[in-house]
Image: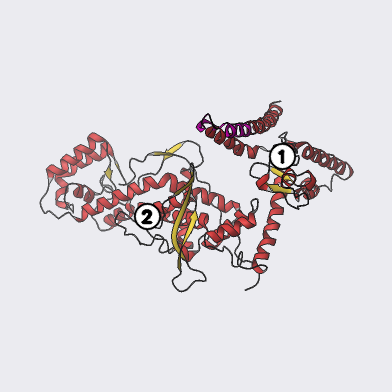
Amino acid sequence: MGGSNKVQPLSSEVQQPLLAAVLYMIQTLAPHILSEAEAKRKRQAADRSLTSHKHPRHEAFLHNLERRVESGEPLELMTPAAAKDARARGLREENDPLAAVSLSALARECGTRQFYGAWLPALRPDLERAFALVGACAPYGRHAAEVEGADGQGHVAWTEPLFSTELKFLVGYLATACGLAVAALAGMRHCELGELVVGCRQPSQEIAPGLFRYRLAGKFIKGQPLGGVRDEWVVTREVCEAIDVAEKLLGPDAAPGTSLFHPVFCDTTYQNFRAWVNGPTGQRLGLAPILEGAVTPRALRRTLAVEIAYRPGGLLAAKLQLKHLSVATTEGYAARPGGAQAKFLAEINELEEERNIGILTDIYRDYQRGIMPSGPGARDLISLFSSVDGRLHELIELAPQLVDSDQEVVAMLTARAHTLHLGTANYCWFIDPAKALCLRLAGTPDADRPLAGMCDSARCPQATHHPCHRPVWEESRRTAKVFIGSLSRRQKTERARLETSVARAERVLAEIDQVAAGAAGKDEI
C-alpha cells in the first residue's frame, strides 16, 4: 500500500491540445454533428418503411433528377467499398460515368427500396445529364456551415461531405470527447463515469448574479458497499455541456437512467480520437496535434489534483474539492495524516518550487526584453534583476567558455523564487513578514505565509503586477462598474466603496499598460 503514487500527471504538451480539442468538439462541432446524426436516423427510419416495386417509376425519377438540377444538389455517391464490390461483381463498368453513383439512393428518394438494373437503359440519358451538371458527393454534411477554426485563423466548413460510416465514426469521436471532458474536468474515476445516466444533471443553482453552481447525480464507488452509494459531484459548466451532448447522442428515445458512458472510453477509443485530431480533418479545423502519451481516467484525475494543488492554498483546495467531488484523486490524499497525504504534500512542494523558478525566470526574460514589473514591489524586483545582470557580466568576463547563462540565472534566482506566492491578481514576494500588509492587517506579524484572502496588492510593498494579471484587474473594474450602475441613490457607502475599487483597478491597469507601452516603444526603436 505504501509508496508514491505511480500514476503520473499528463504533461502540458498532451493536456493542453487534448482539452482544446475536446472542448472545441463539444462547444463548436457538436450541434452540427448532432443535426447530421438526427438526419441520418430519420432517413434510416424512412428507408425501413419503404416497399419494393417491380415496375419502373420513371416519372418520379425524372422529377427527382430535374429537382436536383434546378437546385444544384449533387447526386449521391456510393461508398468506395460498395463501388469496388459492384465492379467486382460485374454490376458496374470501370469506365461507366455512373460507376460510383448510388442509384439505390435515388430509388429510395422516389419511394422504392431498390433500383432494378432493367430501369437503367431508359433512365441513363437523364442520369448522365444530371451527373454532368451537378456531380455527386457523399450524403451527409453537404451544406456544412462555417465555424471559426480552433486556431482562430478564420472560418472553415465544419466538415466535408460524409458517408454514413464516416458520420458514425464522427459521432463516436464526439462521445469520446464527452467522456474525456468529464474525466478531465470533474476528476471522476472510471467506475464512476460508468454510473452517469440520462437525467444525471441537476438543476443549476444561481448562488450570485451570473454565478451558477452545477451538479451531477451519480454513485460513489470506491470503498463503498457493493453497488456504491448515491452521491453528487459539483462540476463546471463545461462538464454539464459535455453531459448534455452525451445525452443527445443517445437520441430522443433514450429513457432516463440509460448509461451515458457504457462502455466507458478506453485506450482504443482515445487513440482513434487522437488520430482524428492529428489527421487531415483535425488539421483542417485548426486543432493542435496531441503528442503521444498514456491518457486514462486515472491520469486525468491525477492531473486535475496537481493543477488544483498548484494554486494559492492549493493543497487545502485540492483536498476539499476532491472530497466534495467524492473523488480522492490518489488514495489517501485527504484520508489520513502522513502516508500518501504527506507524500502528496512533498510532491506538490517540489512542483511548486519548479513552477516558481520557471515563473521568475520568465519575468527576468521579460525584464531583459524591456517588459518591467509594476506595483509597489517592482523596484525591489528590478534591483534584483539588475544585480543578476551585473553578476552574469562579471562571470562572462572571467570565464566566458564556462558560463551557461540559463543555469547561472536559475542559480541566482532560486533564493528569491522560494519567496514567491501566487495571488489571484499579483505575485507576492514574501521576503519580510514585517512588511507584509496582509499580516499587519490581520495582526499576525510572525506568520510564515501570506494571507491571500486579505491581500491588497495595490498597497503591499512586496507585491508586483505583470501583464498576465491584467485580465483579472480588467474584470474587477468591469464588475464593480456594473454594480455601481445597479445601486440606488441611498446606497452612498456601497457606492463609495465600489468607486474606490474601480479607481484602484484603473491605477493598476494604467501601471501595467505603461510598462507594456514602454517595452513596445523600445521594440520599435
x and y, in percent, of residue 501 in the image: 62, 34
Q: Identify the disc placed on residue 464.
A: 1
In the image, taking residue 165 as reference, residue 299 lies left or right, namely right
Dividing the image into 4 quarters, which one contains the C terminus? top right
Mark 1 → mark 2, Cα distance in angstroms: 47 Å
- From this viewpoint, which residue is outermost toward the right? 398
Q: Quadrant of residue 376?
A: top right
At numbered mark 2, what does the secondary structure look like: helix, strand or loop? helix
Magenta stretch, residue numbers: 484-502
In the image, taking residue 420 as reference, residue 311 lies left or right, namely left
At numbered mark 1, what does the secondary structure look like: helix, strand or loop? strand
Dividing the image into 4 quarters, which one contains the N terminus? bottom right
Which residue is depicted at the point 11% across and 49% down? 56
Residue 101 on the magenta segment: no
Q: Which residue is mark 2?
A: 247
x and y, in percent, of residue 326 in the image: 52, 62
In the image, taking residue 199 as reference, residue 75 lies left or right, namely left
Q: Nearer the viewer, residue 395 or 348?
A: 348
